[in-house]
Image (tube, grey):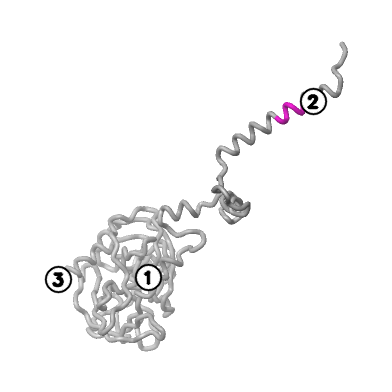
Amino acid sequence: MRRPPRLAVGFVGLVALVALAGVAWANLSADAPRAPAGASPAAFADAATGAGGRGMSAAPLRRRLGGPTERDGFARIIAGVRPAVVSIARPARPTHVSPQSGTRFVDPYLQGDTRVGAGVVIDPRGYVLTSQQVVGAERALWVTVSGSPPAVLRAHRVAEDPAADLVLLRVMTSVPLPAAPLGDSDRLELGDLVLAFGTPFGFAESVTSGIVSSNHRRLLIEGRTFDDLIQTDARLNPGSSGGPLVNINGEVVGISIGTLSMNSAFVGIGFAIASNRARALLAQLAR
């Protein structure tokens, strides 16, 4: 049998290649991002690569969901909440000693002859939410609020919930203070991102991150039973006590009070009082 000329074979192959290329281009064009009419080549490149040159970016989706993006991380949340976080100091009087292992309270940090913990301003008039572990039995305390330079102000108790280990203070101030909003702790879901603010080891304005492992943990801490504790792996250390646990909307959803520890070391399990429990303290002010 006579073989077809090489030119004919080459022509058929070229036609087939062009056809395949056309099909591939049609499929790619259907999904590819399109630049607006008149846009520059650079604008089109940004639309196709997410301006990062690594393909379509997930950042626009996260912006629509309202969470942190790759670009800003937690910076936006921290910038909004940190000014409302305060350090609370009291005399280092003899107090209970937490066990080295097991479920325990997060103690204030011992700094010389002073115990230092944290709290959060929840009302611009100077109302500060913290834990009983931070303030102890003291009636008058010193609170350091953010500023340049930070201001050290007197504060006193105005309400407390011993069963929940929560205390509401009033800072003596004539000017409004930065405040963080209280969120609805019942809306937390497993896996939600949270940030824990505090003063661990005396380092003011420190922040750690984690996720919610439980929103309704019933637990015995040093002989006291707590209901509806929030469990998280955000790192808590001495001085983190009383600090706010904050969701990705910048809302206070808990107050840090306890951890599970082995030989005084944090092992990745922390606990916070749900913010909805704190609303009862605010109700006392309205009476």
Q: Which residue is mark 3?
A: 286
* 2 or 1: mark nearer the eye: 2
Q: Amino acid at mark 1?
A: Val
Q: Which residues are magenta?
A: 13-18
Q: Is residue 38 above or below residue 279?
A: above
> How would you rate the neighbour count of disc 1 (Cα within 10 Å): few for under 14, some for 14-19, many for 20 or more?
many
The structure residue drawn at horizontal position 34% and vertical position 86%, both measured from the top left corner, is 152
> How would you rate the neighbour count of disc 3 (Cα within 10 Å): few for under 14, some for 14-19, many for 20 or more?
few
* 3 or 2: mark nearer the eye: 2
Q: Quadrant of the C terminus?
A: bottom left
The structure residue drawn at horizontal position 64% and vertical position 34%, both measured from the top left corner, is 24
Q: Which residue is mark 1?
A: 81
Disc 1/disc 3 C-alpha distance (Å): 25 Å
Counting residues from the start of the chain, the first of labels 3 and 2 encountered is 2
Q: Amino acid at mark 3?
A: Ala
Residue 55 among those drawn in magenta: no
> How would you rate the neighbour count of disc 2 (Cα within 10 Å): few for under 14, some for 14-19, many for 20 or more?
few
Q: Look at the image and tell me whether residue 93 can be seen.
A: no
Which circle marks residue 11 in the picture? 2
**SS for dot 2:** helix
The structure residue drawn at horizontal position 44% and vertical position 55%, both measured from the top left corner, is 63
Counting residues from the start of the chain, the first of labels 1 and 3 encountered is 1
Considering every residue shown, the one lying at the far top of the view is 1
**SS for dot 1:** helix
> Is 15 positioned to the left or the right of 165 in the image?
right
